[in-house]
Amino acid sequence: MSRSPVSLCSLDEQQVIPAYVKSVIESRCFQSAPALRSLLLFLWQHREEQISEYAIATEALGRSPLFNAKTDATVRVQISRLRQRLEKFYEEEGRSQTSRLFIPIGSHQLCVDSRVITEDKDAAIAPASDRQTSSLPYLARALAGTCTVLAVACALLGLKLTELQRRVEHFITPVSVPRFWSTFYGNGLAT
């Protein structure tokens, strides 16, 4: 006998749900995904516990007790979809929220990230590690551009040096060497 998925009503009776979690669950983004809402509520309810894929499958997703996590990837797929849906929610409807829900990759644990929102609702002040990560594409482009400019400069310098060498060789006239010394120079060995 499988349990029915967790609903907002059954969860409200057990504990208080913060406004930022309710706003996610009741959003347009999650209206068309009842399984993901149920999964999110279950993960919220058990956020401080270590939960197994089996527990998620049978209790949150309504799978049968015969569920086998080794042969059925349903939980991993649904967690991935929930992760993507949360990202979509925070890009669209939830941009101004200061507390954000997320699920780290490789985990089933629901986490809360509290960020400070600046006056510009599109930009959040992130920790230093996030700022370094977000500036990497800019730094990579800047480094690639610098390397390209240096490569072009080296190529032009090489061409200029080759041209200068040809000009110098053109103006140098062979010096006649006395016969005595020509025997020393004529054999091609170093003197």
Image (cartoon, rainbow, N blue to C red):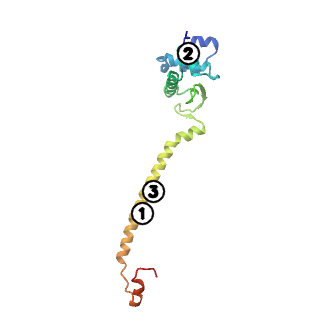
Q: What residue is shown with label 3?
A: 150
Disc 3 packing (10 Å; few <14; some 14–19; many ≥20): few
Instruction: Give the mark nearest the N terminus, 2 or 3.
Output: 2
Asked if 44 appears above or below 187 in the picture, the reply is: above
Disc 2 packing (10 Å; few <14; some 14–19; many ≥20): many
Q: What residue is shown with label 2?
A: 58
Image point (49%, 44%), residue name: 138
**Disc 1 versus disc 3: distance between alpha carbons?**
10 Å
Asked if 103 appears above or below 128 in the picture, the reply is: above
Residue 163 visible, this orientation? yes
**Disc 2 versus disc 1: distance between alpha carbons?**
70 Å
The residue type indicated by label 2 comes to Thr
Quadrant of the frame with the N terminus: top right
Judge depth for marks 2 and 1 and give the one in front.
2
Q: Nearer the viewer, residue 19 or 82?
A: 82
* Callout 3 secondary element: helix
Tell me residue 117's x, y (percent).
57, 31
Image point (53%, 13%), residue name: 64
The residue type indicated by label 3 comes to Leu
Asked if 179 appears above or below 74 in the picture, the reply is: below
* Callout 2 secondary element: helix
The label on residue 157 is: 1
Instruction: Give the mark nearest the N terminus, 2 or 1.
Output: 2
Q: How many marks?
A: 3
* Callout 1 secondary element: helix
Q: Nearer the viewer, residue 176 or 159?
A: 176
Tell me residue 173's x, y (percent).
36, 81
Image point (38%, 74%), residue name: 168
Please indicate whether residue 137 sits to the left or right of residue 20 in the image: left
Disc 1 packing (10 Å; few <14; some 14–19; many ≥20): few
Q: Are marks 2 and 1 in contact (CB under 8 Å)?
A: no
Image point (50%, 17%), residue name: 35
